[in-house]
């Protein structure tokens, strides 16, 4: 997908492909989020879709994987850390290429979880933490949000673009003084 920047000041947004309805989850399903902000960003041509796990060479469907220590392992014990790291680097390359303002990623995913992930026991229990891609993007200086943080993501996008990109014609930086 192409991203629009032009003279409008509008910045691109990296978004987990599953949130956009792409059937790329480990089960072969999607995690579609029907939200007016996502629809608007898509219509504006600023969304860059990525599934780091697929970009890293994993198939769809695939065995579930969770972070265990510093490794990513499947439910059957296979170490898939390298594929997750490769996918994180692919996502980072896209973020840099399109100079994205932020990333909106799938919460709880071992790739994309921005605030929480599964605990590595395949029990369904979630813990504070971040996925491999979310961590890599943050380390590189990108803002990362989960789909449950759309309000915060939208505010960060507005801040990154400044008032001229948000339809504001007010160029004053201070409110008028009342003496």
Image (cartoon, helix red, strand yellow):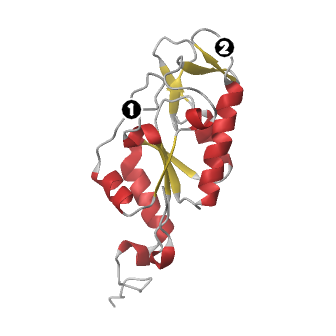
- On screen, residue 152 versus residue 134, left or right, reads left
Name the image quarter holding the C terminus: bottom left
Q: Which mark is drawn over residue 78?
A: 2
User: Would you place residue 122 above or below residue 112 in this image?
Assistant: above
SS category of the residue bearing label 1: loop
- Residue 63 on image: x %, y %: 54, 16
Mark 1 surroundings within 10 Å by alpha-carbon count, few (fewer than 14), some (14 through 19), many (20 or more): some
Residue 89, by quadrant, is top right
Residue pictured at 46% horizontal, 73% vertical: 162
Residue pictured at 44% horizontal, 76% vertical: 8
The answer to whether residue 109 of the structure is visible from this angle is yes
Residue 44, by quadrant, is bottom left
- Residue 9 on image: x %, y %: 48, 74
SS category of the residue bearing label 2: loop
Q: Count numbered badges in the picture.
A: 2
Q: Mark 1 — residue?
A: 30
Residue pictured at 34% horizontal, 60% vertical: 43
């Amino acid at each position: 997908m192409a991203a629009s920047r032009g003279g409008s000041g509008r910045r691109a947004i990296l978004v987990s492909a599953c949130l956009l309805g792409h059937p790329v989850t480990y089960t072969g399903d999607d995690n579609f989020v029907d939200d007016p902000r996502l629809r608007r960003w898509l219509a504006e041509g600023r969304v860059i879709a990525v599934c780091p796990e697929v970009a890293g060479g994993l198939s769809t469907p695939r065995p579930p994987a969770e972070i265990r220590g510093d490794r990513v392992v499947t439910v059957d014990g296979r170490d898939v850390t390298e594929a997750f790291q490769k996918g994180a680097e692919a996502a980072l390359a896209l973020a840099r290429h399109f100079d994205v303002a932020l990333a909106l990623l799938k919460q709880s995913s071992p790739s994309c979880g921005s605030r929480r992930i599964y605990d590595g026991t395949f029990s369904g229990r979630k813990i504070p933490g971040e996925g491999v891609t979310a961590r890599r993007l943050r380390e590189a200086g990108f803002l990362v949000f989960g789909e449950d943080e759309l309000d915060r993501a939208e505010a960060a996008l507005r801040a990154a673009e400044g008032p001229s990109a948000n339809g504001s014609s007010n160029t004053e930086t201070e409110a008028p003084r009342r003496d």
